[in-house]
Amino acid sequence: MTQFYGKTKICYGPYALETLESFPASHAFVVTDPFMVKSGFANQAVSHLKRKGISFDIFSGVEPDPTLQAVVEATGLFLRSKADMILALGGGSAIDMAKAISYFGRKADQNRKTLLVAIPTTSGTGSEVTSIAVITDKVNAVKIPLNDELLIPDAAILDARFTRTVPPQVTASTGMDVLTHAVEAYTSRHSNVFTAIYAERAIRNVFSYLHRAYSQGDDMIARDNMLIGSCMAGLAFTNSGLGITHSMAHSLGGLFHIPHGLANAVLLPVVIDFNSFDAGVKYREIAEMVGLPAATVEEGTRNLVSAVRDLNASMGIPAHVRELKVNESEYRKSLDAMAANALEDICTESNPRMPSHDDIVKLLESVW
């Protein structure tokens, strides 16, 4: 049996933020980062809580790549707050942290019912609709992907106005995260007709709108379509799983603090080439859907790899890890550890081609 699961109420478009006034809550625990507070974005969100008479506490201590230690601390604050809503406002880090707080809070008090609402301010992770949250274990220098239906938000509010001021390089790296989600969902060994529909639309959106959003930040049509594409890619991969681009990116990012989307962007071309032995037909389909010559599987795969590399280059994303200020000696010493971590990553199981330890090492060597 094949199934597709989605529980998140998705509110999108102009004035979507007003949906906050419709949720049945009395006290909200707002999870965000310092920039959201300083920029006034947090105030825009909580103004709707005030209008509805919903009291709130703001936790603004979210940092990039939230750590397990930070999640434990914030969960304690949440439990003491007696909140019946967790409101996540920010990029993937804020949403993942809010999801983890909700998850561990539920485990600590199973009788407590809490509404989880996510407002993404970047077009990247799709975390607002997924069952996955990525937390960093600083002690072992590795990113841990949690996967549980309890992590799926109850509602997502997609308001592209929050993404308008995202800097070009962040737009680029998070946008390539969207593409990686969609491509890996489409080619996953657990892909199905429903995940393919969402993944295809996300892929089309990235190739049509990412560079526009990167080069013209005020282009709200591009911003809106990237935000929708990010959400659709999330709906796809939370049901199909991902692949070794993400497995290696988790390991690479955990050890060398490379932003997740950037790591995915560097790795995706070599993974497409590696997987083409088993997923070449699907890569040809992707090439065709974005208008690339694909008379044969080989031509389609080759042109897709080139198109991804060209998109990266057009946004200043390097082709090699060495261009990301990573020490070569440390990188080469870490190859075996990164490969071992990648093989144990939950994303590897759904990759269309099962890699060996040596395969992962060679792929990591190829992007140096």
Image (tube, rainbow, N blue to C red):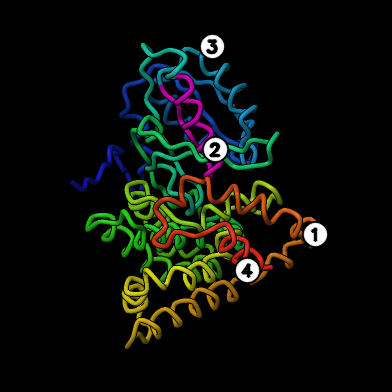
Residue annotated with mark 3:
80
Tell me what residue is drawn at x 37 percent, y 42 percent: 129
206 horizontally vs 93: left or right: left
Rendered residue at 56%/70% (across/down): 215
Tag 3: amino acid: Arg
Read off the magenta span. Answer: 85-105
What's the CA distance linking mark 1 and mark 2?
29 Å
User: Is 86 in the magenta?
Assistant: yes
Q: Quadrant of the C terminus?
A: bottom right
Above or below 309: residue 54 = above
Mark 2 neighbour class, 10 Å CA radius: few under 14, some 14 to 19, many 20 or more: many
Give 227 or 128, whichever is nearer the viewer.
128
Q: Which residue is labeled 4 in the image?
A: 317
Instruction: Quote the CA–CA distance across marks 4 and 1.
Output: 18 Å
Pointers 2 and 4 in contact (CB under 8 A)?
Answer: no
Going by the numbered disc 1, the residue's amino acid type is: Asn
Disc number placed over residue 244 in the picture, else none: none
Mark linked to residue 327: 1
Given residues 156 and 246, the one toward you in this image is: 246
> How far is the residue under mark 2 from the one under mark 4?
24 Å
Q: Is residue 231 visible?
A: no
